């Protein structure tokens, strides 16, 4: 991680109470070209901000000296409230965006989400003008509604395991063909929904996408 990396454990002001969060930042006095938000998988199945996929994605943003925020949805970890089937959780994502906008004013955001965090986070990110780019990891397209992306022209990256039972790459590519704007689907061969043996290629794909889109960033 960058030498100037700082860690801040905090609580966001969520719609139903405090939301536990961790912010990695490049240090005081830095005006970052981007700020990143990473949303975790389903809390009823053990998803938290400490999930390994979420953590690895956050490390990629940190390597580029970008501030990156992870938080626990309502009812997860030390966050207040209870699970709301992806409805109230959209307000949690907005609270996280509000925090980043206040802490790093003027910095556009890239919003990434894994599984449930992808489904909920990208819906909010599409509608919020402060979010410039979207990253979906393990998008559960087989049984979830991603139709909102049909009216979302923001640049989109999707990282999907070849054998994902919740989101087949074929289904994802079929849907992505109808989505406007720049989009890219990267299929990680030999992996399922959880990227157990593919955190390195997953991270490399995310880093490559960031570097190609933002020549001003330097991978450390």
Image (cartoon, rainbow, N blue to C red):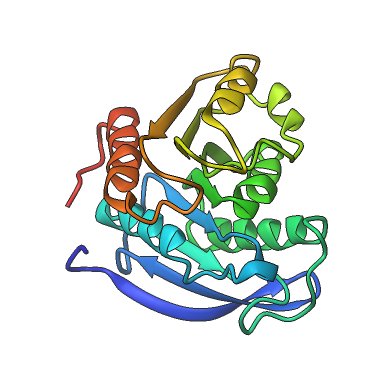
Up-down relation of residue 26 to residue 129 (above or below): below
36 or 167: which is nearer to us? 167
Report the front residue among 27 and 177. 177
Q: How many marks?
A: 0
Q: Is residue 103 left or right of residue 2?
A: right
Q: Position of residue 43 (x, y in %)?
A: 66, 68
For the N terminus, give its image quadrant: bottom left
* Residue at position x 44%, y 70% in the image: 23
Residue 184 horizontal side relative to residue 143, left or right: left
> Picture coordinates of residue 208 (x, y %)?
28, 35
Q: Left or right: 31 with respect to 119?
A: left
The answer to which of 9 and 119 lies nearer the viewer is: 119
Give whichever of 66, 47 is nearer the camera.
47
Residue 6 in the image: above or below residue 155? below
**Above or below, 171 relative to 22:** above
Give x and y (percent) for residue 22: 47, 73
Task: Name the residue at 71% across, 22% down.
Answer: 150
Left or right for 134, reference 204: right
Residue at 35% x, 52% y: name it: 61
Q: Residue at x 77, y 56 (%)?
A: 86
Residue at the outermost bottom position: 78
């Amino acid at each position: 991680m960058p030498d100037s990396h700082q860690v801040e454990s905090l609580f966001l002001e969520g719609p139903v109470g405090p939301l536990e969060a961790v912010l990695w930042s490049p240090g005081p006095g830095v005006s970052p070209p981007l700020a990143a938000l990473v949303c975790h998988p389903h809390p009823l199945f053990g998803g938290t901000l400490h999930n390994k996929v979420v953590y690895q994605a956050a490390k990629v943003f940190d390597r580029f000296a970008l501030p990156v925020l992870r938080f626990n949805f309502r009812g997860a970890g030390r966050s207040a409230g209870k699970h709301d089937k992806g409805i109230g959780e959209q307000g949690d994502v907005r609270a996280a965006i509000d925090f980043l906008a206040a802490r790093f004013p003027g910095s556009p955001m890239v919003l990434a989400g894994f599984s449930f965090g992808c489904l909920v986070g990208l819906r909010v990110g599409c509608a919020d003008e402060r979010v410039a780019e979207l990253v979906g990891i393990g998008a559960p397209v087989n049984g979830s509604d991603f139709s909102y992306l049909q009216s979302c022209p923001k640049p989109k990256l999707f990282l999907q395991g070849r054998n994902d039972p919740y989101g087949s790459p074929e289904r994802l590519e079929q849907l992505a063909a109808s989505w406007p704007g720049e989009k890219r689907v990267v299929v990680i061969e030999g992996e399922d929904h959880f990227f157990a043996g593919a955190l390195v290629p997953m991270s490399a794909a995310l880093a490559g996408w960031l570097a190609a889109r933002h020549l001003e960033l330097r991978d450390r």
